[in-house]
Image (cartoon, helix red, strand yellow):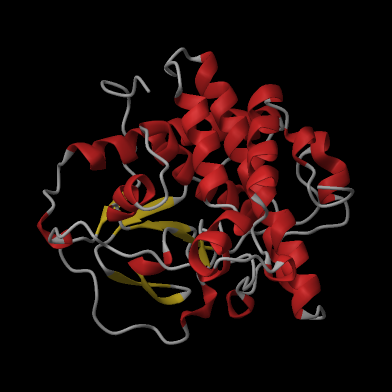
Amino acid sequence: MLWKGRRQSDNIEDDRSDSGGGGLGGGGGQFRIPIGGRTGGGGSIFLVILVVLAGWYFGFDPSTILGGGDGGLLPGGGQITDNSGQDNGATPANDEMKQFVATVLAETEDTWTGIFKSQGLTYEDPKLVLFSGQVRSACGFASAAAGPFYCPGDHKVYLDMTFFQQLDQQFGASGEFARAYVIAHEVGHHVQNLTGIMSKFNQMRQSMGEAEANQMSVRIELQADCFAGVWAHYTAQKGILEQGDIESALNAAKQIGDDTLQKKTQGYVVPESFNHGTSQQRQTWLARGYKSGKLSDCNTLSGPI
């Protein structure tokens, strides 16, 4: 990915030097990659995905944070193990990885601002918080072991960048664009939050059983993957993707599928517990968004997935 020298976002909050401390209570509100806020107004958003948004209205109650599809990248609150042996807090504030994250975030801002503008709307940039080890958010207290997550209560993406090492070393998903996919997926949850999709699901899941909520969570997560693909489509049009970039993102989607992670961690799969989607599903929807660049092709909320 030819990212160096491009615009970097100002919406980065670097809390690595003071991460930790007491929590806000109740950590169940984070959108762990699964992989999350308040919006005003009403009505459906994009005409091109009217079927997705019809009847869904803005409005988010922070007390009903999404649970099953919890805005994180890793299915089922999957844990990662830090084997880097590095002091997370010692990372320089102006390190290259931070510059990479800020550049990718800027690219998502440009893409989604353009998409929203084409519909006569204004895109609200999310903040991205860099932390080390543990962090407090409007969704509660979170550990880096749960992976990156989005919190709809404050419209922020939270990332401990040591996750990128784990993505490479533990999950076997290397490459800069695999890392970019992680960020784009979380921003996809932000788009769902702004369009009212997330708050509607939060309302619906209150009357769902666990199995039904998991199934709906899978649809939410796959749509975030598709939105990440839409972003990749427009990024490719700028000529900043290199050979193998898309393949690395698709491999990352494969490695963090519910079935693949369950096989690795416990040796067998439990389909009814899936809340992010299988490896094949995640790859399929990421690729679909990338190939078409159309939000109308990201309707995971009805029909087969």
Specify the quadrant of the image occupied by residue 98: top left
* Residue at 69% over, 51% down: 195
The picture quadrant where one finds residue 39 is: bottom right
- Is 102 placed left or right of 298 in the picture? left
Which residue occupies the foreground of this view, 69 or 263? 263
Direction from residue 232 to residue 27 in the image, left or right: left
Percent across and percent down for residue 131 are: 27, 61
Residue 165 locus on image (x, y percent): 29, 49
Q: From this viewpoint, is residue 121 visible?
A: no
Q: Is residue 276 above or below residue 97?
A: below
Decide: is 67 above or below 126.
below
Tell me the residue at 52%/47% (across/down).
255
Placement of 205 over or under 282, stated as above or below:
below
Residue 230 point in image, percent of width and height: 62, 31
Which residue occupies 42% across, 41% down? 173
Can you name the residue that lies furthest to the front here? 267
